[in-house]
């Protein structure tokens, strides 16, 4: 069997991400002001479940970081919060993230948003079939991401969803930043394997770093079968730190605003991933590195990274 044939589906997806971003940016750029409401949104809601929830949270942070944006409230949350903690209103824009367009809780949250009078956007992969009208009415806009992945661990689906939404809402600035991101090469997998070892027990981060940590922990569970936990940096030092054992490694997603960086440094993290710069998408390289790191841990552990075929 050739070396190419030995590459896992997860690695193939990771290596295709930059081309997927180019296609998503080009496709999303075809939308015009006519596809969106004339009036600016009162609020923008982003929601999903699992990786889609984390992508939704990260999109909210991307827009919050954009210095030129009109100060419209951004709310990232789980689909479960819609209608229970977060109540959509007329004039809101509601973005429902679901990689395959089938997550019942997310579709229900989108329907709640529609009934409240929000402008509804379904963010889903190419090839997604919309639910029948007996389940929900068609959204106002379907924002396609990458083609559907062939295995359950979502990687390119996550980054391409973020790419589509940020390009729609921050057209010129996001497109320019995604173009710069496509020029960054893939990490050296063998060197990464040496750095990450058998993987961490705990991932820490604050602000964007927290949701990157949670996505990284999920990828470690899905791809490498590692039972990793994720916490915000501040949350960790209010109880979870007491459960740390001598053999438990920490990965820290560093961000300048993380007030616990020095406290975490004293714990001697096994691996540190930095977020550099203050642009809207400065954390994308950290997200990609976490995806590759999960693959590296799987290879080190002798685990098949492809999980469950679709």
Image (tube, helix red, strand yellow):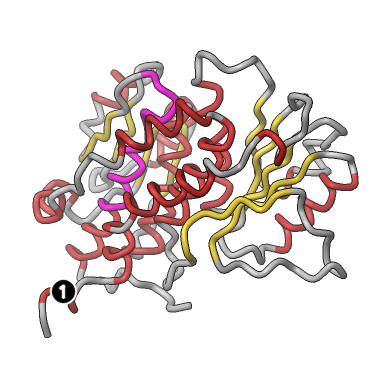
Q: Is residue 106 above or below residue 289?
A: below
Q: Which is the main secondary structure of the residues drawn in magenta? A: helix
State the image quarter where residue 243 is shown. top left
State the image quarter where residue 241 is shown. top left
Any magenta on residue 286? yes
Residue 175, percent from left and from top: 43, 34
Residue 9, percent from left and from top: 31, 70
User: Magenta part of the protein: which range?
Assistant: 278-293
Residue shown at the point (78%, 37%) measured from the top left:
85
Q: Which residue is mark 1?
A: 4
Residue 144 in the figure: left or right of residue 218:
right
Closer-to-camera residue (121/25):
25
- Can residue 58 be seen at all in this image of the molecule? no
Residue shown at the point (17%, 63%) measured from the top left:
300
Residue shown at the point (19%, 45%) measured from the top left:
185
Residue 263, percent from left and from top: 31, 21
Under circle 1, the secondary element is: helix
Residue 137 in the figure: left or right of residue 201:
right
- Can residue 109 be seen at all in this image of the molecule? yes
Any magenta on residue 290? yes
Residue 86 in the figure: left or right of residue 125:
right
Residue shown at the point (74%, 58%) measured from the top left:
107
Closer-to-camera residue (273/262):
273
């Amino acid at each position: 069997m050739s070396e190419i044939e030995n590459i896992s589906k997860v690695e193939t997806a990771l290596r295709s991400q930059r081309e997927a971003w180019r296609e998503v940016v080009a496709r999303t750029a075809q939308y015009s002001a006519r596809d969106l409401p004339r009036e600016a949104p009162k609020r923008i809601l982003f929601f999903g479940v699992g990786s889609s929830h984390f992508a939704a949270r990260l999109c909210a942070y991307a827009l919050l970081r954009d210095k030129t944006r009109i100060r419209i409230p951004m709310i990232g949350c789980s689909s479960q919060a819609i209608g229970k903690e977060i109540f959509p209103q007329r004039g809101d824009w509601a973005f429902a993230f679901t990689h395959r367009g089938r997550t019942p809780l997310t579709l229900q949250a989108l329907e709640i948003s529609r009934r409240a009078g929000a402008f509804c956007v379904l963010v889903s992969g190419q090839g997604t079939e919309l639910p029948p009208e007996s389940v929900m009415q068609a959204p106002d806009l379907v924002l396609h991401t990458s083609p559907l992945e062939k295995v359950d661990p979502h990687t390119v689906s996550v980054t391409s969803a973020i790419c589509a939404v940020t390009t729609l809402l921050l057209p010129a600035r996001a497109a320019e930043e995604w173009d710069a991101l496509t020029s960054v090469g893939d990490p050296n997998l063998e060197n990464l394997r040496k750095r990450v070892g058998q993987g961490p027990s705990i991932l820490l981060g604050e602000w964007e770093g927290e949701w990157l940590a949670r996505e990284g922990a999920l990828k470690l569970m899905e791809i490498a079968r590692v039972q990793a936990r994720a916490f915000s940096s501040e949350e960790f030092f209010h109880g979870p730190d007491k459960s740390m054992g001598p053999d438990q490694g920490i990965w820290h997603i560093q961000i300048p605003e993380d007030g616990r960086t020095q406290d975490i440094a004293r714990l001697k993290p096994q691996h540190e991933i930095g977020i550099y710069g203050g642009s809207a998408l400065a954390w994308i390289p950290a997200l990609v590195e976490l995806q590759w790191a999960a693959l590296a841990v799987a290879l080190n552990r002798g685990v098949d990274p492809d999980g469950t075929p679709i």
